[in-house]
Amino acid sequence: MIKACIFDLDGVIVDTARYHFIAWKALADELGFEFTEKDNERLKGVSRMTSLDILLEIGGLNFPREKKEELAKRKNEHYRSFILKMTPDEILPGATEFIKELKEKEIRIALGSASKNAMTILDRLQLTSWFDAVIDGTKVSKAKPDPEVFLKGAKALDIAPEKCVVFEDAEAGVEAAIAGGMKCVGIGTPEVLGKANLVVAGLHEMNFEKLSRL
Ligand code: B16
Ligand code: MG
């Protein structure tokens, strides 16, 4: 019997990939190399510093740690200028309705995201009060596919991992859920997320009945 749902943020509840792309691309332009939307796919679900490492690898560059921290800080300030203007209209289709249905059925809800900006985004989307626990990039030391973020979510909710379902759009996130002993619903395509127990195109295709059948 499922007792809790743990949601990834970017790609599941909201699509901030576009803002990440614009901010990383500006940095690449400044450093003098090309960064495409296809390259940006590699950064989804990945932490900020690892994203920077991937970006610099694409540009064939490397810098000392302090310089990398400065670049990551600059990218984040640019990115935040976009997310600070977000509105609830940007919540992906079906997310609010599904979360409300879960609440009515007394399912506990947590966020499990790699982003250190998750709280700002939830606030801007006016979703904060729906979450019983938020585990974000400020609270974890190991990136997905390590299950740390989801295990901490389950613990914060006081629900056993096998009674939790994770919603994830990244392959590493699906692997993290499975490694944590949880069920997983992939948001995307079966080609990429085939390891999940169920794959749907978005939360608009989810409801409590489908959840109960997992
Ligand atoms: P920040 P998620 C991830 O969010 C994004 O998909 C990824 O592109 C980003 O690099 C990461 O958060 C860190 O974000 O720079 O805001 O700390 O999918 O785990 O919700
Ligand atoms: Mg994601």
Image: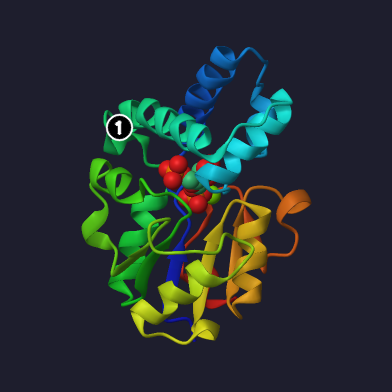
Camera sees residue 158: yes
In the depicted view, which residue is nearer to us: 137 or 73?
73
In the depicted view, which residue is nearer to us: 105 or 181?
181
Secondary structure of residue under mark 1: loop
Q: Position of residue 35 (x, y in %)?
A: 65, 21
In the depicted view, which residue is nearer to us: 132 or 45?
45
Residue at the (57%, 49%) spot, across then down: 45
Mark 1 residue crowding within 10 angstroms, few (<14) / some (14–19) / many (20+): some
The image quarter in which residue 52 lies? top right
The image quarter in which residue 92 lies? top left
Does 155 sit left or right of 198 as displayed? left
Q: Position of residue 81 (x, y in %)?
A: 31, 26
Q: Is residue 124 above or below residue 147?
A: above
Q: Position of residue 185 (x, y in %)?
A: 59, 63
- The three-letter code of the residue at mark 1 reads Met
Q: Is residue 193 above or below residue 80?
A: below
Camera sees residue 204: no
Which residue is the site of mark 1? 86
Residue at the (40%, 58%) spot, across then down: 136
Q: How is the image coloured?
A: rainbow
Q: Is residue 88 above or below residue 158?
A: above
Is ligand 1 less than 8 Å from the beta carbon at label 1? no
Q: Quadrant of the C terminus?
A: bottom right
